[in-house]
Amino acid sequence: MEILYQLLISDYDRKCLTFHLLPFVKSLLSLLGKYSRLHLLASALYSPMDTTVDLLRAVMGGADPVSLTNRVMDIISGSMYLQPGWFTPDQKVDIDPKYIAKNLTANQQIMVVKKMPLDPNATYYFTCKTRLLENPPDAMWATINTHAVLEIQGGSQRMLHFGKMNHVMKEDDWVEVGGDFITPMDVKTVGILVSIQSENIPLEVSPSTVLLTKLLPNPAWKKEADERIEVLRKGTITINLTNSKKYAHRDLKFKLEQIRSSFPVGSAIGGGAIAGNSALDKKYQKFFFENFNWGTPENDVKWRIMERTEGRPNFKNGDKALDALEKVNCGSRGHCLLWARTRTIPSWLVDKSPEDIKENILRRFSYTAEHFGGRFTHWDVNNEQLHEAWYAEKLKEPRIMSWMFKEFHALVPSTKLFTNDFMVFTNGLMTQSYKQQVRKLLEDSAPVHGVGIQSHFANKARIEVLTKRLAVLSELGLPIWMTEFDVMLDKEEEIVEQMEDALRLCFSHPNIEGIIFWGFWDQKMWRKQSALASGANFELTAAGRLFKRLFFEEWRTNETFSMPEDEEETLTWRTNAFYGNYRLTAYKGNETLWTEEFELEKKHEATVDLDI
């Protein structure tokens, strides 16, 4: 016991701590019997170490063995189930030195790993650290690509592009490149090629950083995800009731209903439809407000659309959307202040001088802040710079994005500012690049408050690669939001399956703090296959029925309870419940005695004291 205590109060990394404690806990559990973990997991992750120590000192002072087991399980489960690295099952591949290139410095390309046998139909994740030794003479930066060179049974060869890092400069020094790939059934050997597009530019790979892991399928992933949901998305409600009127206990019934979830679930919306007066508009509004608590104006506040004519911004539809959201206390995402891709630049801005472009950026920030203030909860600052960097290249300022974050934050400090990009979650081509982009922003002390992953699914994705990509982005230590979720697959059952997997994984992930669908009605959305409702009557699709089952049944708390006959005048009733707003109703037979509403806030408990 004393050894356990000393281990727990030491400064061990919790992951390391797990290895020390696990044999002990297994032995203890075998003696005491198996206890449910579900609501024992909650406190360890959120408690500071001194709180843990205080609890353990109490245990050392004479707490019973079950309490000790529960607290140890808190810490271990908090480590194993709530840290992305723990629930991403993988296996390091030992690379025989004979497969590693002897010279890892070369012009333009390096075959880092040469013709190494790998398992067929398996998922791998490769990374290494690379640096440019010179900048391209004719460009501000370079792109580093990572390919798998597949030797196929029979002698043919294929190239699989699985990693792309844009906007790399010599000044960045070492950058981690790579990504995930799946080997074909007929693979014989695999080589890993790291290259840049610019000719005759020397690059170098650090041999000690070459890492290949095999991502392992996890048949129990849904069960583990559900366990994490119990910990992450729930708190304790305690209801203390006093029967001062001496009602017969057998006549008393109580119903607890969750009337609103606090977890952000939203959709892209149109300012016209969300505030319109037509019959269809009213149905659109009814569906939205019954199902979502956040909204993102899909197009209404984009610069190119707001200010079609220079100097004449149109706030009309943005105002309509915000007004409608605020009336029912919905959160809002401003999408987007700037958009870094060439086709999205206001036409009147394209040919201006760098000085004029920068002046207009500041003007855009100024009128947006002056008009909307802090009404938008979030803003996407410079959309999709991972793919193109129009502003940076026109201004010849590679770190311009950091400046953008700082300038707008100074005007609206209450609004949380996000990056937002694609090919980082549904596709892993640029996951490492996205992590590098955000890291550079943080190095510049840019006020980045969250990471947006767009989440447009066009192909079925293995759950192990989705889990790994989230683990990579979680290394940044920032909240992650699914900002534009939809699924475009051929078959309805495939859409539903992919949607459920993605939603369950993300809802169970400790770094995911919100999910925004990119539309919900097939008459007003980009990818109609993903609609939750269809037709003039907004009938639920298969995806819509899944949405309702998850967010309004499985991930809501609705319970009934009664007062036992043998109780005194008081009753204390507890339950583990999803965070959100609740209505408690007391019944005497068929008569409603009263209703009481209250909120269970995240990371808190709710205690309700009532006289029946």
Image: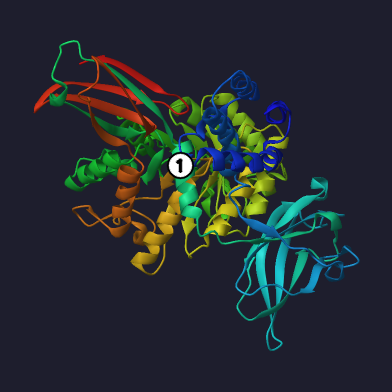
Asked whether residue 315 is in view, the answer is yes
Q: Position of residue 397 (x, y in %)?
A: 72, 43
Q: Is residue 562 above or below residue 209?
A: above
User: Depth check: 58 or 95 in front?
Assistant: 58
Task: Using the rendered view, name the quadrant where residue 150 is placed.
Answer: bottom right
Return the residue at label 1: 229
At 66% from the left edge and 73% from the top edge, which residue is drawn? 119
Q: Position of residue 574 (x, y in %)?
A: 35, 27
Asked whether residue 304 is in view, the answer is no
Q: Is residue 105 left or right of residue 426?
A: right
Q: Residues within 10 Å of mark 1 (few under 14, many from 20)?
A: many
At 38% from the left edge and 22% from the top edge, which residue is drawn? 606
Q: Residue furthest front?
A: 31
Q: Position of residue 1 (x, y in %)?
A: 67, 29
User: Depth check: 568 or 302 in front?
Assistant: 568
Task: Using the rendered view, name the quadrant where residue 52 is placed.
Answer: top right
Q: Is residue 539 left or right of residue 231?
A: left
Q: Is residue 182 above or below residue 73?
A: below
Q: Tell me how many marks there are.
A: 1
User: Depth check: 610 or 450 in front?
Assistant: 610
Q: Which structural element holds mark 1?
A: helix
At 33% from the left edge and 56% from the top edge, which residue is drawn? 543
**What kind of residue is marked 1?**
Ile
Q: Residue furthest right?
A: 103
Q: Position of residue 354 (x, y in %)?
A: 67, 42
Q: Residue furthest top?
A: 244
Image quarter hosting the C terminus: top left
User: Depth check: 270 or 215 in front?
Assistant: 215
